[in-house]
Image (tube, rainbow, N blue to C red):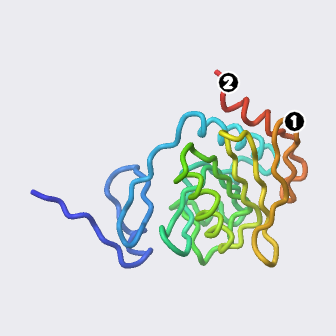
Amino acid sequence: MVQTRPRFYSFDDYLAYDDGTENFYELFNGELVPVPPESGYNTSVAFFLSIQLAALVGHLRVRLHGLELEVRGEPKNRYPDLTVIRPEHIGLLAKRNTIRLTMPPPVLVVEVVSPGELQWERDYIAKRAQYEDLGIPEYWIVNPQEQTVLVLVQQEQGFVTAGTFAGSQRLASPQFANLTLTAAQLFVAGAEE
């Protein structure tokens, strides 16, 4: 018997769907597109950063890859590598780890760039536009290939560059002024055995 792929005509229909797995999907033009697992290195970088941020805001406010954001455009949802949520999100996300368009945006979204032009374009262009549209105060693009961290902050005209950090430069963030992490520490932590 041939199984037909489900088609969704609204984000609410998608949210009501359960295929009985723990798989992540992006909703693109009404169809499910499987989200591949992250590399071990990217996961280690995001996890190390999550520990640093949790020390500042508490562990309940830091979410890794499993948090889903509803966005405008295609696909209709994204799974950031790391997200810092607002205190009011904690209760709202208890049943499903999805921030809807009707909710306030998270405080910070971080993407760790995977190798390849398609991944670069997705993180630097497509996701940037979608996260900017949501009004997220900060978006960090962590690029292991270039060993840089680009910090973008939301202003009236959209995201502007707060800085690109590399080597022994301390990451400077308006939202997390007490963060004492350098770019080098972040990239070394992802590679430690």
- In this rendering, is residue 193 above or below 36? above
Q: Position of residue 21 (x, y in %)?
A: 35, 50
- Residue closest to the eye, 137 or 18: 137
Whether residue 179 sits left or right of residue 140 in the image: it is right
Marks 2 and 1: in contact by CB < 8 Å? no
User: Looking at the figure, which quarter contains the N terminus?
Assistant: bottom left
Q: Is residue 62 above or below residue 26?
A: above
Which residue occupies the foreground of this view, 15 or 182?
182
Residue at the disc numbered 1: 168
Rendered location of residue 141, percent (x, y): 69, 52
**Mark 2 residue type:** Glu
- Residue 137 % position (x, y): 77, 66
Mark 1 or mark 2: name the one nearer the start of the chain: 1
Which quadrant: the C terminus? top right
Which amino acid type is shown beneath numbered disc 1? Ser
Location of residue 181 with respect to 57 vertically, above or below: above
Toward the top, the furthest residue is 193
User: Which quadrant holds residue 47?
Assistant: top right
Classify mark 2: residues with Cα within 10 Å, few (<14), some (14-19) or many (20+).
few
The residue wearing badge 2 is 192
Q: Is residue 50 left or right of residue 164?
A: left
Residue pictured at 73% horizontal, 39% vertical: 147
Residue at image location 67% in from the left, 24% down from the top: 192
Secondary element type, mark 2: loop
Q: Residue at x 25, y 64 (%)?
A: 5
| Residue reaching furthest to the left | 1
| Image coordinates for residue 67, horizontal then vertical, percent | 56, 56
